[in-house]
Amino acid sequence: MLEFLNNIRKLIISLFGESVPEEGAWDRIPPELMTPRERLLRRSSLVMFWGALVNLLAALVVIALAVSAATNDNAQFTAIRAALLGNFNIADDAALLLIIVGILGNMAILSVLAVVILAQELWTVFTAWILTAANGLALVAFGFTPALLAIAPLSVVGLMTIGDLGAFRLNPVMVKELRGRMRGIRGFAIITVFLTLMSFFTMLLYLLRVPQGGVVVTGELGRLLFIGVLFIELMLIIFIVPALTAGAITSERERKTYDLLQTTLITKATFVVGKMQSALGYIVLLLLSAIPLQSIAFLFGGVSEAELILALLVLAVSAVTLGAFGMFFSSITERTLSATVRSYTVATAITIGLPALALIFFQGAYGNVVNNIATKISDNPTVEAAIIYADMIATSLNPITATVYSQQMLIDHQQLVTMRVTLSSNGATIPILSPWVLLTFTYLSVTALLVWIAIRRMERQSG
């Protein structure tokens, strides 16, 4: 048994451990040699990071208070809700769920900003402004007091950088890579083949659905076409994105150009973020080119604009995170093949392994309550609620199941963010979240962490 566990440990280390030599790393600039702009960006990133950490701790505190109130005294829900979300007319337990989501959402976006601000991305400024305005609106309109935990670091960074807004610009690595990709015929050929296959698949779904002897136009047909196109796009992201980013850094080592990059003025953050944006930019172009095919569903009904926007959001966030995994493995390995294998291992684990484990341990508890299927999970309502929430988290971490249940909640129950479900143990109701919400802030947080590690891995500790 011990030998078996030791072999498993060695396998994990071989798959996910670092294999690039330390001397191949990108040197860190000592603080005393930094320019005033570089120091400003580092300090701004640090403020964003601490802001994200404070929001994470606040979310954990609210979760602890919510659990305590649910198990001891439900009257505490009212006091917590009045202090954190006083002007929103919703049930107390659902309000606490929204409070936790709002805090974690701020944490995720602040984490992303803490990383990309080092790359001097122009869109960082606009995102910070939008996030500040959104939190200010939530504070004034709904009494969402945790918004102050996001407004504070954003205001500090805004005051720090307002005198040097010229530091932010379009990423030169991204611009160069995208121009090179679109100058040849290959980029347009891939789009043509992709749309041709998508069109063929859409037509095949239509012909299989239409009964013989006539055409019946129903909302069910429109929904089938929409889900079919969406499924193909998800497969595209899962199996293509990791390969696009897995060679971002290793290809430079293999072409012997990595050492030359260290002599340029391009920073590590600019290089990593630019490489990732260039790879994902082409995927976004493919997704946008498929919108006319998805819009065919509107001719038959059964699909709303909210479903289309929600689907594009899930596709985009999934692409960003899977691309971040490819970038991470590219930073810790020497060969593109090794990074690609590791990236596909993670993609397979997320899309196949995670749902299988969730089905084994939770028996589809979340899907059953969404579909109003009465299934006996436990005689204890607290245990039953815990199982449903655990399955909700597992469902949300898989882009396929998250998309399916999010669309189902929106179409069948007309609920975009939360809905109430009934426990089979005692008939009480509890609020649950739509999976796209959890998927969005979880994937964004993981993306920020992976990109930050990739940047750190490209530098060698000085001294």
Image: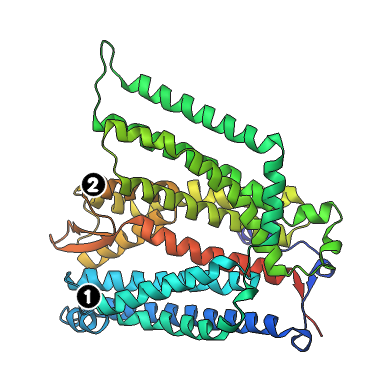
Q: Residue at x 64, y 83 (%)?
A: 40
Q: Residues within 10 Å of mark 2 (few under 14, many from 20)?
A: some
Quarter placement of the N terminus: bottom right
435 left or right of 193 in image: left
Q: Which mark is residue 70?
A: 1
**Is residue 106 visible to us here?**
yes
Q: Residues within 10 Å of mark 1 (few under 14, many from 20)?
A: some
Instruction: Provide residue 460's location: percent of width, then percent of height.
Output: 78, 75
Up/down of 401 relative to 225, above or below: below
Q: Residue furthest left?
A: 427
Q: Residue at x 27, y 49 (%)?
A: 410
Numbered disc in front, either 2 or 1: 2
Quadrant of res 308: top left
Amino acid tagged 1: Ala
Look at mark 2 in the image and give the residue it sits on: 371
Instruction: Provide residue 34's location: percent of width, then percent of height.
Output: 75, 84
Instruction: Provide residue 408's location: percent of width, then percent of height.
Output: 29, 46
Between marks 2 and 1, how big is the CA–CA gap? 25 Å
Q: Which mark is residue 121?
A: none
374 left or right of 261 in image: left
